[in-house]
């Protein structure tokens, strides 16, 4: 019951029409580099700015990680990551906004022997969202 109430409140937030509380939804591709094994990833990201006056964003992403083996040396068939983070615009620069955030990530790995592993991680992130290309908003985060 509590989940249904929270979901209803979240959905209602998208229908607020006051300009000072306008939402924006940005959808786009995502590419990354995991420094542990220098694996690259590609995927998609949805950035929902819930309250522009507060600078609060909900950022979800799905990525496929191109890795041949896990850190233990086992062969991998596939590895992907789903993340959901809340981020807050900390400071506005001339070329973009600095942000900090946290959330959760779910890693799903399929090993060569068809064994599957799921790991849950705590995400802490910081980055900059560039405002220099009109509708295209490149970003960099760690």
Image (spheres, grey):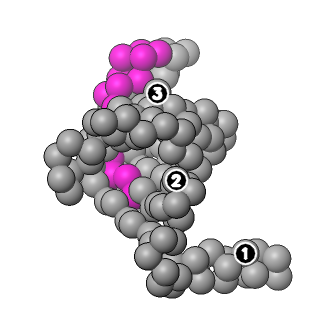
Residue 36 part of the magenta segment: yes
Q: Residue at x 41, y 23 (%)?
A: 34
Gap between marks 1 and 2 measured at Cα: 21 Å
Residue 110 can be seen, yes or no: no
Please state the extent of the stretch shown in magenta in the rendering: 32-46
**Badge number at residue 85:** none
Q: Is 48 rendered above or below residue 131?
A: below
Marks 3/2 in contact by CB < 8 Å: the verdict is: no
The residue positioned 82% from the left and 82% from the top of the image is 1
* Above or below, comparing residue 113 to residue 68 in the picture: below
Q: CA distance from mark 3 to mark 1?
A: 30 Å
Q: Is residue 51 visible?
A: yes
Between circles 1 and 2, the one closer to the viewer is 2
Q: Is residue 102 left or right of residue 4?
A: left
In the image, 142 versus 77, the foreground residue is 142
Q: Secondary structure at mark 1?
A: helix
Q: Which residue is mark 2?
A: 55
Residue bearing mark 1? 6
57 on left or right of 129: right
Q: Nearer the viewer, mark 3 or mark 2?
A: 2
The numbered disc on residue 142 is: 3
Mark earlier in primary sequence (3, 2): 2
> Which element carries disc 3, helix, strand or loop?
loop
Q: Name which residue lies at 39% across and 44% down.
A: 63
**Magenta run includes residue 61:** no
**In this picture, residue 28 sits left or right of residue 61:** left
Vertical placement of residue 41 versus 43, above or below: above
Q: Residue furthest right?
A: 1
The image position of residue 95, as x and y in percent, is: 28, 36
- Residue at 42%, 17% (x, y): give it: 35
Q: Residues within 10 Å of mark 1 (few under 14, many from 20)?
A: few
């Amino acid at each position: 019951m509590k989940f249904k109430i929270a979901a209803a409140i979240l959905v209602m937030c998208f229908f607020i029409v006051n300009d000072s509380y306008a939402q924006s939804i940005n959808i786009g591709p995502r590419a990354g580099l995991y420094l542990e094994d220098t694996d690259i990833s590609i995927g998609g990201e949805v950035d929902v700015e819930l309250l522009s006056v507060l600078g609060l964003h909900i950022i979800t992403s799905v990525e496929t990680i191109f890795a041949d083996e896990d850190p233990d040396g086992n062969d991998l068939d596939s590895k992907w990551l789903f993340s959901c983070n809340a981020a807050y615009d900390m400071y506005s620069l001339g070329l973009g906004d600095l942000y900090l955030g946290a959330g959760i990530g779910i890693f799903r790995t399929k090993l060569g022997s068809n064994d599957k592993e799921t790991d849950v991680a705590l995400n802490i992130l910081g980055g900059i969202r560039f405002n220099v290309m009109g509708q295209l908003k490149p970003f960099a985060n760690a």
